[in-house]
Image (cartoon, rainbow, N blue to C red):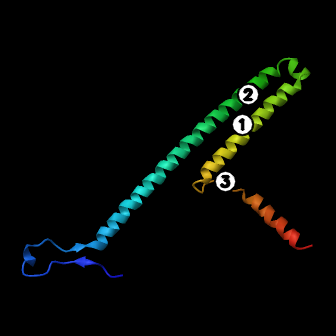
Amino acid sequence: MSKTVCRPVGPAMADTPPAIDFEEERAAAALTASSRDAASQLEKMRSALNEIDTMSTRSFGGIRAMATCALAYMKTPDAYRHPDVLAQIFGSIQAITDDAENFINATAGEFGCDHKDKDWFARMDARELARDKP
């Protein structure tokens, strides 16, 4: 690609400023735009990391509180007379972990950083191969 350079022409060349290199100008403008894009992407990542931190703090705090209650409840005879209370606590813990896992995975996935279980994919590939060959 040839460079576009404007040079002054005529007898007054000695009094004119140096030639303007438009390729350098374009490259500088592209670099500036690229820097803005990188800064924008970095800000989006910071925001996502903050959201992940918030979700994990709330989720783990709730799980800790429920586990503490369940363990304290198990020190009473009622826990063994009414195990359904413990079952409800464990169901709530399970729901919180599912929500947190899905949120964190989806948020990380927006940046291509979500967890991919390679073993699961290998099992699915093997299953497909088994279906293809009787």
Locate residue 79: give its quadrant: top right
What is the spatial separation of the Cα atoms under label 1 and label 3, in whole angstroms? Answer: 19 Å
* Front residue (pair 79, 37): 37
Cβ atoms under marks 2 and 1 closer than 8 Å: yes
In the rendered image, residue 115, in percent from the top left (x then y), is placed at 67, 53
* Front residue (pair 125, 44): 44
- The residue that label 3 is drawn on is 115
- Secondary structure beneath disc 3? loop
- Secondary structure beneath disc 1? helix
- Say the numbered circle drawn on residue 66: 2
**Which three-letter amino acid code belongs to the residue tagged 1?**
Ile
Q: Which numbered mark, 1 or 3, is in the foreground of this view?
A: 1
- Please tell me which residue is depicted at 82% across the width and 66% down the height of the picture: 126
Q: Earlier in the sequence, mark 3 or mark 2?
A: 2
Compared to residue 18, the image places residue 114 above or below, namely above
Q: Work out which quarter of the rendered image holds the C terminus and state it.
A: bottom right
Locate residue 58: give its quadrant: top right
Q: Earlier in the sequence, mark 1 or mark 3?
A: 1
What is the spatial separation of the Cα atoms under label 3 and label 2, in whole angstroms? Answer: 27 Å
Q: Which numbered mark, 2 or 1, is in the foreground of this view?
A: 1
Compared to residue 67, the image places residue 48 above or below, namely below
**Which three-letter amino acid code belongs to the residue tagged 3?**
His
Classify mark 1: residues with Cα within 10 Å, few (<14), some (14-19) or many (20+).
some
